Image (cartoon, rainbow, N blue to C red):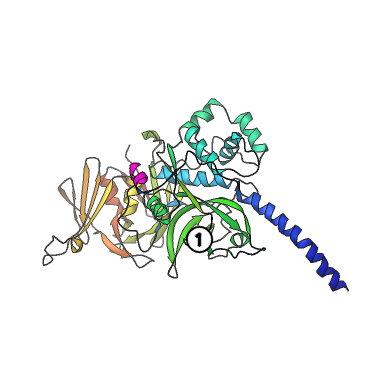
Amino acid sequence: MNNFFYWLFGIIMRPLTAWRIHRMYYNKAGVCDEEINEADIESAGSALLQEFGLKIPESFPKEGYILMRPTFIRNQGSISDCVAQTEDRCLVMENMNQRYVPGGFAIGWMYGRHLESGYNLRGMVPSDMLHGMRTIGAPLHTTFPQRGEVPYIIDLVRRIGRTPAIMAEAARHTYEKTISVDSNHDIKVALMNNRPVRFTMAVSNAFRRIGPDGIYNGTRTNQWNSSYGLHMMTLVGWTYINGKEYWVVDNSWGQFWGNRGTCFISTDRQQAPRARGYISLGNTPQDESNLLKTIQFTTRGGLCDTVLLDGTRFTLPTPIFMHGERHNERIHVPLRFIKEMFGGEVEWYDSNFDPSFNQEQSRIRRITITKGNTVVVMHIGEREYFINGIKHEMDVAPLLARDANDVYRTMVSVRFIAEAFGHQVDWDDRTYTATITRAA
């Protein structure tokens, strides 16, 4: 008899429990599950992307592509500010591409200020945030460090977040246009141009319970695993796991969720329904006094997969490593790191892929780095290099190194490149730390 009453109690309580979980997780997801007003958000396409200076690659890397991004994964906790959390992460990455590293933006201010458009429930409509970033901007975290849930955060922003100093600071961090990138092709084009994607997707109980491997292959459509609303995250690249293609997505649920705060979502749209992506273009340029000043990395143990940029730690897609003869080792970095940190254009030439080259001659693998009036030319395996046509010699030659994906990467000594462009390089032999101070 007791078993019968337990069974009956379970039947009665199950729908109520499911409804409570739905509301709790819907609030945690933090994106308003309503029709989004996208009148001023243009749909992407090759022509529009090219119009704003994005280059359309002839092909995409078969091993995938992941952006350099902040190492730390924030935890939004019980506050439904995933849209503001995502915006903060994307802004830091977008500004880093312009060699400006602000450290972080005022998440609470963005959440409270952009809710003043009229939607004042928990969570946000993404178009409200995107419109607010084009018209108002966002101040730095140090300007307004407070966070909170509505209505508290709305009231707080109204009382202390509208000072002329804060509004002027916010106006320094805006962008001109927002474009939706819905196809896998357009998302990859954005990533290849170092643009993180604001990724909105319907989430479920299965998503909340992703394991330590971070892999999410979609949901089964049954009553115990239905959608709990929309959630916004930061899409930072794509990769292949066991031969299957996945988006690399940073969440805002802390580093103990998924794979240290990151998940891998199948690029198959049948398994990730209702997914939308947005990118911003035309970020407000910063004056020289605000640009990146110091680059620092520690190579104790021979490898380094993070770098400290003006105090903010970023994860490197390709690790830095020490190479060379004993007592004469040099730090080698990938060409992509050189371009992202120092700017300029990097050109790679391999005579094996040049039909006009006489293949009976010795193979040529040439690296050309151009920034302003300075041109640096190097060759794989050769210590001689040229700065504006003048010959110099380094003690460790550029080389090709195989990474974890079994792909060869071009690695060059960071000291000689940095000094060629006038930057100062200091080495601490006690801590194995290199510090690059950018030229003024």
**Does the image show residue 8?**
yes
Question: Of helix, strand and loop, which mostly describes the magenta segment?
Answer: loop
- Is the residue 181 above or below the residue 248 in the image? above
Where on the picture, by quarter, is residue 222? Answer: bottom right
User: Quadrant of the image for the C terminus?
Assistant: top left
241 and 97: which one is in front?
241
Q: Where is residue 79 in the image (x, y as percent from the top left)?
A: 64, 46
Mark 1 residue type: Ile
**Does the image show residue 299?**
no
Q: Magenta region: which residues? A: 47-63
At a point 28% along the width and 56% down the height, the residue shown is 412
The outermost residue toward the top is: 164
Q: Name the residue under label 1.
A: 265
> Relative to residue 378, is residue 222 drawn left or right?
right
Q: What element carries label 1?
A: strand
- Is the residue 185 above or below the residue 168 in the image? below
At a point 57% along the width and 28% down the height, the residue shown is 162
Q: How crowded is mark 1: few (under 14 residues within 10 Å), some or many (20 or more)?
A: many
- Is the residue 9 above or below the residue 413 in the image? below
Q: Where is residue 33 in the image (x, y as percent from the top left)?
A: 61, 48
User: Quadrant of the image for the N terminus?
Assistant: bottom right
Q: Where is residue 418 in the image (x, y as percent from the top left)?
A: 29, 47
> Relative to residue 50, is residue 350 drawn left or right?
left
